[in-house]
Image: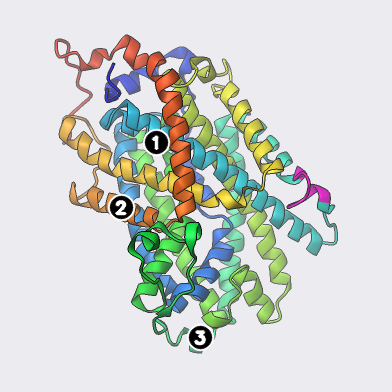
């Protein structure tokens, strides 16, 4: 049996019609856009902006956000083409199965599990921290032993269990709650932007691009892999600082790819998937740029607090009450991030289990709710335990490397599938292919090289574990390996459609 066997798009779509694995189609373009905004905009909008401006880019951090958005847009277009062509749960995993083969699909599925499990756990802990700050400001502090950094982070556990129960109950109900919370989050972000404009001093924008200077760099395993390999000295500010800032704030955009995991539950995926992915990215870009302009206009970049720049910018102007508003926005914002990451994790494992690369029994859906309830419960329990009992902070970059590796393979996969299956009907096509998909892969690879050496070492260990599971279990149990793919039989050609 070949590890490079591919699963045809027709077979992937046919699997979605099997009654025992059939999910409920209930999502619209608006649902997907809200879903994307919900997972992308988290604590980063309140913290990362000031940190990047203070350390590497100055007021030109606005340009950094635009550069990062362009890089994300390249990957987003690749996701949009795949999601409109292969409207099946699993996101990059399913796309890679159709284009690059089973082994690559397994690798990317394994990476996405890492990304979403750790991402949900880390963000749940962040939610607990902001909840503690908010309740402390309101005069009802959480006992230290059960709050953020306590012996057991009970608040994080409770959040994950509540959201896990909601996710298990139904995707439509989850989206309704998500819609309300995203609305609250956007209202507070817009309110902060409008309120902050009143305190902007144009003098703080000069110099817009500060002069280049050597940047304090890490050493040993904590230095970026690119720095380790080249032996060069990183620079802050200047034009180089803009691109360094782009590499830093790129991670504030990560999450739009989770939209693709719900393709199978979308009413009209060929039309709605590209809209949801690209619209959510566009909305987040506008908000990030607006926040960057406000915060660097309120306080000179060299006086910004990198830890909580936005809240402290208002304190700087004697508006301490805004810190409470910002904390409330972060609590609402991080709730939606945890919910969407939980949903994304269950849909990745669902797709892998349906293909028998993981135990097939996991993929059974509830007879009335039409949700993968067994997987939902398992994911909820694991994430709750990790969030409540583990100091996850040191593993945050693992989320980024898992995501970026998925971006690279999806970008390459678009080119491969165009060559292999030009006949497929595509609801959206990446323009100027193969140039833009290849550029997307190169940009994401460059950003991966900016992650630390120790992150790469942990990533390699995770991949080794994945390879062991694949060759001892998944390869032998693969549904495609046992049953074959009738849609690849040349004697019975089946064509989904042809591009116009």
Q: To which residue does mark 2 refer?
A: 74
Give the dominant element type of the magenta stretch: helix, strand or loop. Answer: loop
Q: To which residue does mark 3 refer?
A: 204
- In this rendering, which labeled residue sits more in front, label 1 or label 3? 1
Q: To which residue does mark 1 refer?
A: 108
Image position of 147 with respect to 8: above or below:
below
Apparent side of residue 186 relative to residue 14 in the rendered image (left or right): right
Apparent side of residue 143 relative to residue 362 in the rendered image (left or right): right
Q: Is residue 456 visible?
A: yes
Apparent side of residue 178 relative to residue 417 in the rendered image (left or right): right
Cβ atoms at labels 1 and 3 below 8 Å apart:
no
Residue at disc 2, secondary structure = helix
Q: Which colour assignment does the render follow?
A: rainbow
Residue shown at 43% from the left, 78% from the top: 214
Q: Which mark is residue 61?
A: none
Cβ atoms at labels 3 and 2 below 8 Å apart:
no
Q: Residues within 10 Å of mark 1 (few under 14, many from 20)?
A: many
Image position of 490 with respect to 90: above or below:
above
Quadrant in which the N terminus is drawn: top left
Range of residues picked out in magenta: 145-154
| Image coordinates for residue 242, horizontal then vertical, percent | 38, 72
């Amino acid at each position: 049996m070949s590890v490079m066997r591919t699963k045809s798009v027709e077979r992937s779509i046919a699997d979605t019609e099997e009654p025992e694995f059939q999910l409920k189609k209930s999502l619209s373009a608006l649902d997907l856009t809200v879903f994307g905004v919900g997972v992308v905009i988290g604590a980063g909008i309140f913290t990362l902006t000031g940190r990047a401006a203070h350390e590497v880019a100055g007021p030109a951090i606005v340009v950094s956000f635009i550069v990062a958005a362009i890089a994300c847009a390249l990957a987003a277009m690749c996701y949009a083409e795949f999601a409109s062509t292969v409207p099946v749960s699993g996101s990059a995993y399913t796309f890679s199965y159709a284009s690059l083969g089973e082994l690559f699909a397994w690798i990317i599925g394994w990476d996405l599990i890492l990304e979403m499990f750790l991402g949900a756990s880390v963000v749940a802990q962040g939610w607990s921290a902001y909840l503690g700050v908010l309740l402390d400001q309101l005069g009802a502090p959480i006992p230290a032993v059960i709050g953020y950094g306590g012996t057991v982070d009970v608040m994080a556990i409770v959040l994950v269990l509540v959201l896990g129960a909601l996710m298990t109950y139904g995707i439509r109900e989850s989206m309704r709650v998500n819609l309300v919370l995203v609305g609250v989050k956007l209202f507070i972000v817009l309110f902060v932007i409008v309120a902050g404009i009143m305190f902007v001093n144009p003098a703080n924008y000069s110099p817009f691009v500060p002069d280049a200077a050597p940047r304090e760099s890490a050493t040993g395993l904590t230095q970026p892999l690119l720095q380790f390999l080249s032996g060069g000295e990183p620079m802050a500010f200047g034009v180089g600082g803009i691109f360094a800032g782009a590499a830093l704030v790129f991670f504030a955009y990560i999450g739009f790819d989770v939209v693709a995991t719900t393709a199978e539950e979308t009413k009209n995926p060929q039309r709605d998937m590209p809209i949801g992915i690209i619209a959510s990215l566009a909305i987040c870009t506008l908000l990030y740029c607006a926040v960057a302009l406000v915060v660097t206009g309120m306080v000179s970049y060299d006086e910004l607090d990198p830890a909580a720049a936005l809240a402290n910018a208002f304190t700087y102007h004697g508006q301490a009450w805004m810190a409470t508003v910002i904390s409330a926005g972060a609590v609402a914002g991080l709730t939606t991030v945890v919910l969407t990451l939980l949903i994304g994790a269950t849909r990745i494992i669902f797709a892998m289990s349906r293909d028998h690369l993981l135990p097939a029994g996991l993929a059974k859906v509830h007879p009335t709710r039409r949700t993968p309830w067994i997987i939902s419960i398992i994911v909820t329990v694991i994430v709750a335990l990790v969030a409540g009992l583990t100091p996850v902070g040191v593993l945050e970059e693992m989320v980024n490397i898992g995501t970026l590796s998925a971006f690279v393979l999806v970008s390459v996969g678009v080119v491969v599938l165009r060559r292999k299956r030009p006949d497929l009907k595509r609801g959206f096509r990446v323009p100027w292919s193969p140039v833009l998909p290849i550029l997307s892969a190169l940009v994401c690879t460059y950003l991966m090289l900016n992650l630390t050496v120790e992150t790469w070492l942990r990533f390699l260990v995770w991949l080794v574990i994945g390879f062991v599971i694949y060759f001892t279990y998944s390869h032998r149990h693969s549904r495609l390996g046992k049953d074959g793919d009738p849609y690849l039989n040349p004697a019975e050609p089946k064509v989904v459609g042809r591009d116009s």
